Image (tube, helix red, strand yellow):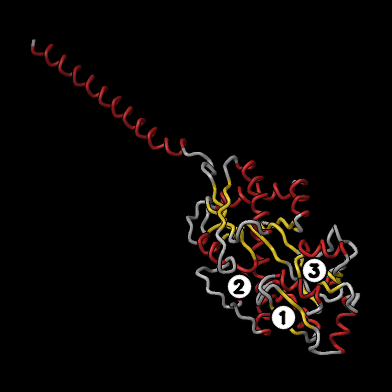
Amino acid sequence: MTSLLTLALQRHLTSMRRLSLSALAALVLGVLGLLSLPAQAQAPYPNKPIKWIVPFAPGGSGDLIARLLAERMTQALGQAVIIDNRGGNGSVLGTDLAARAPADGYTWVLSNGAAITTGPLMGQNIGYQPLEDFVHVQLIGSFANALIVRHDHPAKTVQDLLALARDKPGKLSYGSAGVGSAGNLTGELLKQLTKIQMVHVPYKGSGPALNDLLGGQIDLMFNALIASAPHIRAGRVRALALTGSQRDRDFPQVPTLAETVPGAVGDAWFGLSVPARTPPAVVERLRSEMSRVLNAPETRNKLAEMGMQTLNLGPREFQDFVQQEIRKWGPVIKAAQIKAE
């Protein structure tokens, strides 16, 4: 009797141990399943709307370009890309906001020369490091300025203009949209490369400068090609050269300034940048999609109509470009003693 009872107890304990091992195995599998749930549930980037900070007021060239590309990128990414205009302090305000945003790919900024290269070189008060605080994802494109004179000006070519400047040192005057503007910087670059003397006349915007050019108060100015085009076509002004790296498709007869003065390239540019430490996979996704958008013929034609030459350079080339711009404009700004106002 005793042996039967002992045998029964042994069988019961064995059964209990088997149950415990099974329960433990089930528990472990359950925990492992729970641990894997977040990875499975996490949607790929992007999974919510994206904010693109445009550090300019609505309606300008930068804003119009960003809105065109935001529409295309919305289609490419499957999430809304929403423009957030944050103009102020020469585009520094919006750029600073972007530098302080979370590095998760959901805040972009329309980067540009004034905020990333020339502004800081002129001593502009900024709260970010242009190279260290951003990943510069894609250099979108550039705008050429036109070197224009009034239709009845004696200079018919850049060579004529340089000859006049050498014959009458300090007598020629050039207007710009203001101290530190692209027109001012390009004028000073031309002076330094050719050793000519010209008087800079800064205005509060390119409109007043153009009016004085048409009225004969100044001899020449560097003005955005897209703004100069109607006056060139109407014969009110003569375009002696363009400051881009290549001739424009709509004005193939107008040479680049660099064809006469090597190194005289003074483009305004725009790019897509995100806060530093944005995950590399996100940066690569943005680079890939933006490159595809910029390569689309319809997009390129639209941008060309706006006066932009599409560049479409990725992170490494964009970073190199920024460094080259700093090396290029630093000596020009220092020699001309240009200070931010």
Whole-percent x and y of residue 216?
81, 78
Query: Is the C-beta separation of discs 2 and 3 under 8 Å?
Result: no
Q: Nearer the viewer, residue 184 or 288?
A: 184
Q: Is residue 84 above or below residue 164?
A: above
Q: Residues within 10 Å of mark 1 (few under 14, many from 20)?
A: some
Quadrant location of the C terminus? Answer: bottom right
Please say if the residues under marks 1 and 2 sit with CB atoms less than 8 Å apart: no
Apparent side of residue 329 relative to residue 90 in the rendered image (left or right): right
Of marks 1 and 2, the one in the foreground: 1
Q: Identify the amino acid type marked 2.
A: Gly
Point out the tag, 3 or 1, that comes first from the N-terminus.
3
In the rendered structure, are the residues bearing label 3 and label 1 in contact, judged by CB atoms less than 8 Å apart? no
- The three-letter amino acid code for the residue at tag 3 is Ala
Q: Answer left or right for 50 relative to 309.
A: left
Residue ID at (64%, 64%): 112
As displayed, is residue 239 above or below residue 20?
below
Tag 3 residue: 146
For this orientation, the residue located farthest to the front is 215
Q: Position of residue 73 (x, y in %)?
A: 64, 46
Residues packed near mark 2 inside 10 Å, few (<14), some (14 to 19) or many (20 plus): many
Badge 2 is on which residue?
119
Question: Foreground residue, 321 or 202?
Answer: 202
Dot 3 crowding, Cα within 10 Å, few <14, some 14–19, many 20+: many
Q: Residue at x 72, y 82 (%)?
A: 200
Q: CA distance from mark 1 to mark 2?
A: 19 Å
Q: Earlier in the sequence, mark 1 or mark 2?
A: 2
Q: Which mark is residue 201?
A: 1
The local secondary structure at tag 2 comes to helix
Mark 3, mark 1: which one is toward the viewer? 1
Q: Where does the N terminus fall, quadrant-wise?
A: top left
Residue 139 point in image, percent of width and height = 67, 59
